[in-house]
Image: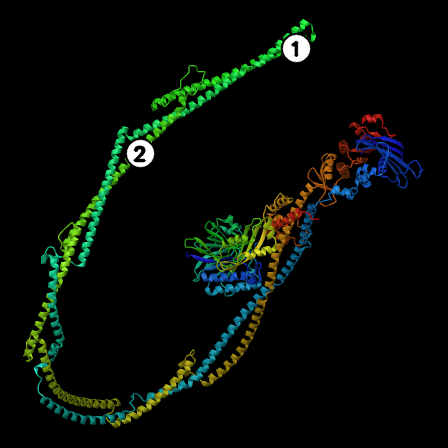
């Protein structure tokens, strides 16, 4: 059995819009998803892989989101670059392939595979390398059943809709490599090999921090699976939480933040970082940082780049969970209520009922989805900030 | 203030009525319907605040000026007052306040008595009938509402309320309660619009795909057309090529046929005739030249013979010249021989001096045997250094070995001495010592235990002594008791004697007292004696037990002391009386110290034994080390012997006698080397002189031999230079003569050679002519000229053929893709070819037109594809949708945050409400709980609202409207009670007048209400409770309250009894 070497990427979403920042970086941020595709194809050519395996973006409802018209054209153009190098590409789209199928040109080496389909992968000389199966959901029966043509071939599978965390029930899968198209970058050993999610080639927000790219997968002669990170993303998101003491000068805080930032290591090809600072502040520091002008000043004190990569800083302020002091009037009640509410809201399905969304609301279904996808922690932090204003205002001495 | 009685001059149906009240407390006034209860309540209000009196039922008013009037007697601050008022029909009237001294007081005294309570407040709180009770609005008066609803919120409450309202408003601004308006709703509507736009653009991909398909199809058509066009072009080109090639090809074929007619005619040079003429002319001139050269050769030979033969010296010219060439060598050799002779003389002198410098005069053989070369010096120095090092190592090791051996021997002697002192082996001694140490440790522990027991025994003894001392009753007590007894006896006797009764009695009393005290003292002593005896007995038992233990310990100590040697301290004396614990002796206190000394000594001995053992180990190790050193010493000794042998060998090798004195040997070698160095120049100078002299003599002999051979010898062989000069002169003369003869011989030879060259040239010219004629196949010049004309014509034809073939090749090169096919050219017909060309041109024109149309169509499609691909509406819409989605997420989180904050603030507000309820509501809550028998436990007012909430015992909250009528009346009654209590706390003490307010209460709650009122009255409030229900009057009676039966409405006795 010959060794196999291929590039696995996920989260191809050329239509995505990254949160914009200063005008000077806008073009970079707008082009980042498209740049990721270009780089992915370039890496496949440079690494001279046996094939390229791609899972496109997965929408919140679990389906593969179809690319926009312009993006589809761009994808087709980029994948056409693989043809002269005879590198086949497999686009695992799961249950939705109508739009993706349009990407396949007459001379393209691109193959779109849907749930339940199995394709044979050959090398440039036409020899069979492996069989690749596209899986829909963990409940499918083929998890442990080999339906491949040659039993000696390594069995590869891709599940574009699933994350590694969802594979706990299928650890006995017989596949040598089980690629996931959803979730963060993670690996999990399975009985015959490895399950791996490379995460999106380009992060789209601060919920997806750290370096992003593809994974170079090597299956050795003996069946051993090795993975190697291949940086792709041009924009990197980082979210760093830091705690400040009451009355700490902004300069000292900036120095500590710079030290925290210097602990991060940039990857090849990164052109900008978008760093969100979640500063947990208390007392005087909170009062200072809640002022936008002070936050701008703090951002100005932070380093403009990390290892020659420009950095854009976003500073958000989170009040300390135990501030204001619970012995202040109303504060304890407020904090207790928030804790109770946060716990109750942890179940997304209960949120509409807890918030009393009217049954006859025009956009009830959409609003419920929005509520289910909402970041409760961020909302609670906002609520805490509001609560601080309420508590502070209520406890102020009445001048009148 | 409370009313003590009412006096009605005239009011409503009442005339001259005096109604005494019971003051503070519950006053139940019974009267059936229309008995005048409400009139009485209105009378009280009218006296206090004035107003229009009711019409009398008995007829029209008589006196318009004074239609009603009466007085209220009351007590305020403990002082009696009377308020009298005359009422007029118009509502006016005169009021008079009479003080405790029956003197009228100023009118404003009434305000003071009413505590400045307004009539409205009095009407709504203090004087309430059923109608007013049922109306919540009666509590909406500003002053009352402040008490009931807490409207006088502090700043904190107001700000909290404001914050909650603000949060709610902001949340509703994002999404209204019904979900139909708000910013979020607008965004969601906008999203729907965008989705519609996205759907409207859904046709773009399919249109694009169609165009792509069309483009591919047309591209195929274009490719086919182009292929067809190319094929036609190729055909046309081929036919045109044939058309161009055919004439040239035909010309070539014609030339080739004509050339074939000339057959095997060979080509002749064009200048062949001229060549033949030139050959003949040159032959004639060469014949004449041969004759001239023959004559010249004969003349020169004749002149050479006239010069004669060469002498012998010329024949051996080379050898003679070689000898002459050695002239400079002979000169230098002669000089060198002279120098060698001088050096020989000088070296002999120096050697003489060096030899004289040596002490002993070595013979020549010794000097010759000494090797004074640098290599010998190096070897000798190295051998000396090696030998010295080996000797040094051997000496050092020997010293070290001796030193260690001596030290070890000394240590062994010391150990032997210490072992002799011990007498046994160290192991045995150590075991004994360990046993001894163990015994001493046990002994020390026993000593400590003994001392502790001694100390405890001492303590028990002291305690026993104190107990024994405490048994004794102080003497003064006995003395006092005796005085009492004796005094008593004395007075008793004196009484009997004097008959003085008091004295007897007193004496008896003293006697009795004395006896009593004595008995008590005796009994107490007996009692304590028993207890003390028990204690003493117990202590003595303990002492005995300890004594036994102490004895055992001492026996053990004695045993151990016997085992470990003499006792370190004297044994304590043992008393015979076992009940007495012996005191610790002074000697015993030193015992532990002695044991410690013994322990210390034992430890020292143990350490000494350890040292011996260590020394033995050290000696063993040292012996082993010495053994190893001996082995090393042997090896070093061998090394030294080897070095010595090598040294001796080196001495022998350099020519010295063997010696172990390194320095002396080196010094001797140095001197001999110097002598040898001085002798060397003498030998070499002699040797050189001999060689040079022998060489010169040999050269002279060779000169002589050669001189005799060439017949030029007349000198001395010992003077070679003179001989060489003579030979040089003779050789020069002979050579000059020989040169002249050689010149003539050379001229003759040159002439003969020229003659031979001319003859050879003549032969060559003859062969060339013959070859020229043979090549043309003729034998004469005329035939040759004829044959040459035919060749010229054939050459001309060949040139024409070459030209045609070149032209054909050029044509072939111009169309590299086409080949010249002989068969096609043979079958070529010009007219047919022209017809085919015309047909093909027409077909091509049609094909070009079709292709142009198809390309135009393809261009249109490509343009439409470009337009579609340039259409960025889908991207714009998707980006707007994505941005909107992000905004929606943020807004949703904001909404969530606002909701959370609002709910949390609501909870804070609820807590604030709970903590900040008005005192009136707190008091009312208590009353309501009693009125409803704890069914409803709490009344509260939402912060900032003029409404009430009631919590039941299950924590449920109800609004006033949600309560039943009876419960609502109980709520309002509770509120009044609370208000009155609050007023009383603020110093406003007015009677509470209730007019049949229990009408809608059920039995249980009626009783509860009555109890509540009763308790309320017991707090010091005056309550005037009017009722038309007899059972309530009986209930009051049953509870010990005498109802006031309004005149004419005395109830039947039976009913009263029954109640």
Residue B590 shows in the view: yes
Work out which residue is located at the far top of the displayed protein and give it.
Answer: B497
Residue B831 is situated, as x and y percent measured from the top left of the image, at 47, 85
Q: Kindly identify which numbered label has been placed on residue B611.
A: 2
Residue B129 shows in the view: no
- Badge 1: how crowded within 10 Å, few (<14), some, or many (20+)? some
Q: Secondary structure at mark 1?
A: helix
Judge whether B1045 appears above or below A180 on screen.
Answer: above
Looking at the rendered image, the quarter that the C terminus of chain B falls into is top right
* Foreground of the two, A59 or A108: A59
Circle 2 or circle 1, nearest the eye: 1
Residue A34 is situated, as x and y percent measured from the top left of the image, at 54, 62
The chosen color scheme is rainbow
Dot 2 falls on which chain? B
Label 2 and label 1: CA atoms lie apart by 95 Å
Q: Secondary structure at mark 2?
A: helix
Dot 1 falls on which chain? B
Residue B37 is situated, as x and y percent measured from the top left of the image, at 85, 34
Going 58% across and 56% down the picture, which residue do you hit?
A297
Q: Which numbered disc, 2 or 1, marks the residue that appears first in the sequence?
A: 1
Q: Which residue is mark 1?
A: B509
- Left or right of B898? Residue A89 is left
Looking at the rendered image, the quarter that the N terminus of chain B falls into is top right
- Left or right of B1037? Residue B372 is left
* Circle 2/circle 1 CB separation < 8 Å: no
* Foreground of the two, B236 or B978: B978
Going 22% across and 47% down the picture, which residue do you hit?
B392
């Amino acid at each position: 059995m010959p060794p196999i070497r291929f590039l696995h990427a996920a989260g191809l979403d050329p239509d995505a819009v990254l949160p914009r920042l200063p005008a000077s970086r806008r073009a970079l941020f707008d082009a980042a998803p498209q740049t990721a595709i270009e780089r992915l194809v370039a890496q496949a050519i440079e690494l001279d892989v046996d094939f390229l395996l791609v899972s496109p973006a997965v929408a919140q409802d679990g389906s593969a989101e179809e690319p926009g018209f312009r993006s589809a054209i761009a994808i087709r153009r980029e994948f056409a670059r693989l043809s002269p190098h005879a590198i086949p590409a497999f686009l695992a789209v799961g249950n939705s392939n109508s739009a993706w199928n349009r990407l396949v040109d007459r001379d393209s080496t691109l193959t779109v595979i849907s749930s339940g389909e199995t394709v044979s992968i050959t090398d440039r000389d036409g020899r069979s390398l492996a069989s690749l199966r596209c899986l829909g959901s963990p409940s499918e029966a083929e998890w442990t059943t080999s339906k491949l043509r040659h039993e000696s071939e390594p069995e590869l599978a891709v599940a574009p809709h699933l994350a590694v965390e969802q594979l706990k029930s299928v650890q006995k899968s017989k596949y040598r490599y089980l690629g996931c198209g959803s979730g963060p970058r993670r690996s999990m050993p399975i009985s015959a090999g490895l399950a791996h999610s490379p995460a999106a080639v380009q992060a789209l927000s601060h919920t997806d921090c750290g370096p992003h790219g593809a994974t170079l997968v090597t299956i050795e002669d003996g069946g051993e699976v090795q993975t190697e990170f291949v940086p792709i993303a041009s924009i990197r998101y980082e979210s760093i939480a830091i705690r400040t003491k009451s009355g700490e000068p902004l300069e000292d805080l900036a120095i500590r933040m710079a030290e925290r930032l210097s602990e991060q290591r940039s990857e090849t090809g990164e052109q900008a970082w978008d760093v969100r600072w979640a500063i947990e502040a208390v007392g005087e520091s909170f009062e200072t940082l809640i002022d936008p002008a002070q936050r701008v000043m703090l951002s100005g004190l932070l380093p403009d780049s990390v290892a020659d990569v420009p950095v854009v800083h976003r500073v958000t302020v989170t009040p300390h969970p135990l501030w204001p002091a619970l012995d202040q009037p109303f504060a304890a009640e407020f904090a207790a209520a928030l804790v109770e509410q946060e716990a109750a809201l942890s179940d997304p399905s209960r949120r509409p009922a807890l918030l009393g969304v009217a049954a006859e609301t025009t956009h009830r279904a959409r609003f419920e989805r929005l509520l289910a996808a909402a970041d409760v922690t961020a909302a609670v932090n906002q609520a805490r900030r509001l609560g601080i204003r309420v508590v502070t205002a209520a406890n102020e001495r009445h001048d009148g | 203030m409370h009313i003590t009685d009412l006096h009605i001059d005239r009011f409503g149906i009442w005339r001259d009525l005096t109604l005494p009240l019971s003051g503070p407390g519950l006053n139940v006034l019974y009267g059936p319907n229309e008995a005048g209860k409400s009139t009485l309540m209105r009378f009280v209000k009218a006296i206090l605040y004035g107003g229009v009196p009711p019409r009398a039922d008995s007829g029209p008013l008589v006196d318009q000026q004074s239609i009603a009037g009466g007085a209220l007697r009351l007590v305020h601050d403990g002082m009696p007052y009377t308020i009298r008022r005359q009422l007029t029909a118009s509502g006016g009237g005169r009021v008079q306040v009479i003080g405790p001294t029956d003197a009228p007081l100023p009118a404003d005294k009434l305000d003071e008595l009413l505590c400045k309570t307004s009539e409205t407040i009095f009407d709504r709180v203090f004087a309430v009938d059923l109608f007013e009770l049922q109306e919540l609005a009666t509590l909406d008066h500003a002053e009352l509402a402040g008490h009931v609803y807490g409207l006088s919120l502090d700043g904190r409450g107001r700000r909290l309320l404001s914050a909650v309202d603000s949060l709610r408003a902001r949340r509703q601004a994002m999404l209204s309660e019904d979900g139909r308006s708000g910013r979020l709703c607008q965004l969601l509507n906008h999203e729907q619009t965008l989705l519609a736009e996205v759907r409207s653009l859904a046709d773009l991909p399919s249109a694009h795909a169609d165009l792509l398909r069309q483009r591919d199809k047309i591209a195929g058509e274009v490719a086919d057309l182009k292929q067809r066009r190319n094929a036609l072009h190729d055909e046309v080109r081929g036919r045109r090529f044939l058309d161009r090639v055919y004439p040239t090809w035909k010309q070539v074929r014609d030339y080739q046929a004509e050339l074939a007619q000339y057959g095997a005619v060979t080509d002749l040079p064009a200048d062949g005739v001229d060549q033949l003429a030139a050959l003949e002319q040159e032959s004639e001139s060469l014949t004449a030249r041969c004759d001239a050269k023959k004559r010249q050769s004969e003349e020169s030979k004749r002149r050479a013979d006239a010069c004669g033969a060469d002498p012998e010296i010329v024949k051996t010219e080379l050898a003679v010249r070689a000898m002459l060439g050695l002239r400079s060598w002979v000169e230098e050799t002669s000089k060198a021989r002279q120098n060698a002779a001088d050096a020989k003389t000088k070296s002999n002198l120096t050697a003489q001096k060096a030899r004289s410098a040596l002490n002993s005069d070595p013979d020549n053989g010794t000097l010759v045997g000494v090797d004074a070369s640098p290599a010998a010096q190096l070897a000798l120095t190295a051998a000396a250094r090696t030998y010295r090092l080996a000797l040094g190592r051997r000496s050092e090791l020997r010293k070290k070995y001796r030193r260690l051996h001596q030290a070890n021997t000394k240590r062994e002697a010391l150990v032997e001495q210490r072992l002799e002192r011990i007498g046994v082996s160290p192991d045995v001694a150590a075991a004994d010592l360990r046993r001894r140490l163990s015994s001493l440790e046990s002994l020390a522990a026993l000593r400590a235990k003994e001392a502790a027991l001694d100390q405890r025994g001492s303590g028990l003894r002291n305690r026993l002594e104190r107990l024994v001392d405490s048994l004794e009753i102080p003497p003064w007590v006995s003395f006092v008791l005796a005085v009492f007894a004796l005094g008593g006896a004395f007075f008793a006797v004196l009484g009997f004697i004097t008959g003085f009764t008091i004295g007897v009695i007193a004496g008896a009393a003293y006697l009795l007292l004395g006896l009593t005290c004595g008995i008590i003292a005796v009994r107490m002593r007996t009692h304590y004696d028993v207890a003390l005896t028990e204690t003493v007995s117990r202590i003595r038992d303990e002492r005995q037990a300890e004594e036994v233990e102490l004895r055992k310990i001492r026996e053990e100590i004695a045993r151990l002391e016997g085992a470990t040697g003499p006792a370190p301290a004297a044994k304590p004396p043992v008393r015979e009386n076992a009940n007495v614990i012996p005191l610790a002796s002074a000697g015993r206190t030193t015992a532990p110290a002695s044991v410690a000394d013994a322990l210390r000594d034992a430890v020292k001995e143990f350490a000494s034994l350890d040292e011996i053992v260590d020394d033995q180990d050290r000696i063993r190790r040292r012996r082993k080390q010495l053994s190893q050193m001996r082995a090393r010493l042997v090896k070093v000794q061998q090394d030294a012997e080897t070095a010595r042998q090598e040294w001796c060998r080196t001495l022998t090798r350099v020519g010295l006698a063997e010696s172990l004195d390194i320095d002396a040997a080196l010094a001797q070698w140095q001197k001999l080397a110097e002598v040898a160095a001085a002798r060397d120049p003498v030998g070499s100078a002699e040797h050189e002189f001999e060689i040079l002299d022998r060489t010169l003599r040999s050269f002279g002999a060779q000169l002589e031999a050669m001189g005799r051979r060439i017949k030029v010898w007349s000198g001395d062989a010992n003077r070679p230079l003179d001989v060489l000069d003579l030979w040089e002169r003779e050789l020069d003369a002979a050579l000059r003569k020989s040169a002249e003869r050689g010149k003539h011989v050379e001229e003759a030879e040159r002439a003969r050679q020229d003659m031979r060259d001319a003859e050879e040239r003549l032969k060559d010219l003859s062969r060339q002519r013959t070859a020229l004629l043979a090549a043309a196949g003729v034998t004469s010049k005329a035939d040759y000229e004829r044959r040459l004309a035919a060749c010229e014509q054939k050459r001309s034809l060949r040139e024409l053929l070459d030209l045609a073939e070149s032209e054909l090749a050029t044509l072939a090169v111009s169309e590299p893709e086409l080949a010249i096919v002989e068969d096609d050219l043979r079958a070529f017909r010009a007219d047919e070819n022209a017809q085919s060309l015309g047909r093909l041109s027409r077909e091509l024109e049609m094909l070009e037109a079709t292709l142009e149309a198809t390309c135009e169509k393809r261009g249109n499609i490509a343009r439409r594809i470009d337009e579609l691909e340039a259409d960025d509406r889908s991207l714009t819409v998707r980006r707007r949708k994505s941005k909107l989605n992000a905004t929606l997420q943020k807004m949703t989180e904001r909404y969530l945050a606002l909701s959370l904050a609002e709910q949390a603030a609501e909870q804070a507000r609820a807590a604030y409400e709970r903590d900040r309820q008005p005192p009136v509501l707190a008091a009312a809550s208590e009353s309501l709980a009693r009125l409803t028998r704890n069914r409803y436990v709490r009344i509260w007012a939402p912060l900032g609202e003029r409404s009430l909430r009631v919590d039941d015992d299950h924590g449920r909250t109800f609004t006033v409207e949600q309560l039943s009528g009876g419960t609502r009346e109980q709520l309002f009654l509770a509120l009044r009670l609370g208000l009155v209590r609050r007023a009383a706390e603020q110093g406003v003490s007015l009677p509470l007048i209730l007019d049949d307010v229990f009408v809608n209460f059920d039995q249980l709650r009626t009783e509860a209400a009555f109890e509540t009122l009763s308790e309320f009255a017991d707090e010091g409030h005056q309550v005037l409770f009017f009722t038309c229900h007899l059972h309530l009057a009986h209930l009051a009676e049953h509870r010990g309250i005498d109802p006031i039966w309004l005149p004419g409405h005395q109830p039947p006795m039976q009913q009263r009894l029954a109640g």
